[in-house]
Image (cartoon, helix red, strand yellow):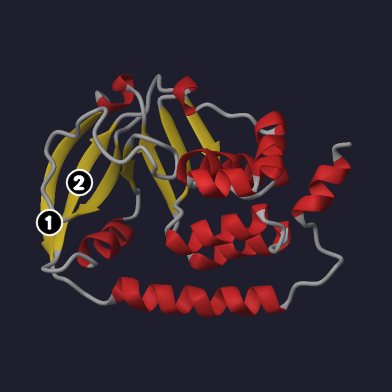
Amino acid sequence: MMNKKLYYGSNNIIETPTLGKGNPHNDYGLGFYLTEEFDKAIFWASKNEGGGYVNEYAFNPDDLKILKLGCETKEEVLTWISLLVKNRFSYSLKSQYKNNIKFLNDHFPIDVCDYDVVIGYRADDSYFLYSRNFVGGDLSLESLTKAMKTGKLGMQTVLVSRKAFESISFVNAKLVQASNQYALFRERTSEEYRTIVSGQDDSMTFFRDIVRSYK
């Protein structure tokens, strides 16, 4: 397979990504989070005060074990939620929703340590709010799925194993200027989310309905 291009928007040039560095409370845990979309990398780099850099890498996925999480099926969405709960929910939220979280752990267990790469939706703070509202029972599965697609944050490629880190090589870095794209994005997604929530009704599938369907 030919090498793919991956991009990382940052306030720094990163020629040699380091396994084990970063925030363990990101969407899929500790890893190096990249995108296949150059424009998305610009988006993340330009939100930094003073601008940033789009780092480009060549990526060879041959022989890597890859977990792909979309939102085309209920199982994919619930597996995605299960990972977010594990990595991004605070201790207090885990205590508050412990019964629903136990259900997710029991029925949609997933361990990214079994994989080299995870490809799935990116969850910024607004997406995290959607996942919390879904687990809390206020947002339907249909609304969550629509919100994931509407927000257009896109998919991210996350390197989680040493083998995956060895599969990329730095190409170059492009300087980008600071912009208000991210602030405008947050405003737009907030309005879209309010519209989605206002269209909910009792015929939709809420967390309680999913739990009931497995009994």
The three-letter code of the residue at mark 1 reads Lys
**Coordinates of residue 65 in the picture (x, y in percent):** 46, 23
| Front residue (pair 170, 29) | 29
> Would residue 81 be visible to someone looking at this image?
no
| Front-most of residues 113 and 106 | 106
As shown in the figure, which amino acid type bears the numbered disc 2?
Answer: Glu
- What distance separates the C-alpha of mark 2 from that of mark 1? 8 Å
Looking at the image, do the residues carrying marks 2 and 1 touch, with CB atoms under 8 Å apart?
yes
Is 92 rendered above or below residue 164? Answer: below
For mark 1, what is the residue? 174
Tell me the element at label 1. strand
In the drawing, what numbered circle is on residue 27?
none
Residue corresponding to mark 2? 56
Within 10 angstroms of label 1, few (less than 14), some, or many (20 or more) residues? few
Residue found at x 32% / y 45%: 34
Measured from the top left, where is residue 160 in percent x and y?
36, 29
Where does the image place residue 7, in percent across and percent down from the top left? 26, 48
Helix, strand or loop at disc 2?
strand
Nearest to the observer: residue 186 or residue 64: 186
* Residue at 80% across, 51% down: 208
* Residue drawn 43% across the image and 79% down it: 187
In the figure, is residue 76 to the left or right of 45?
right
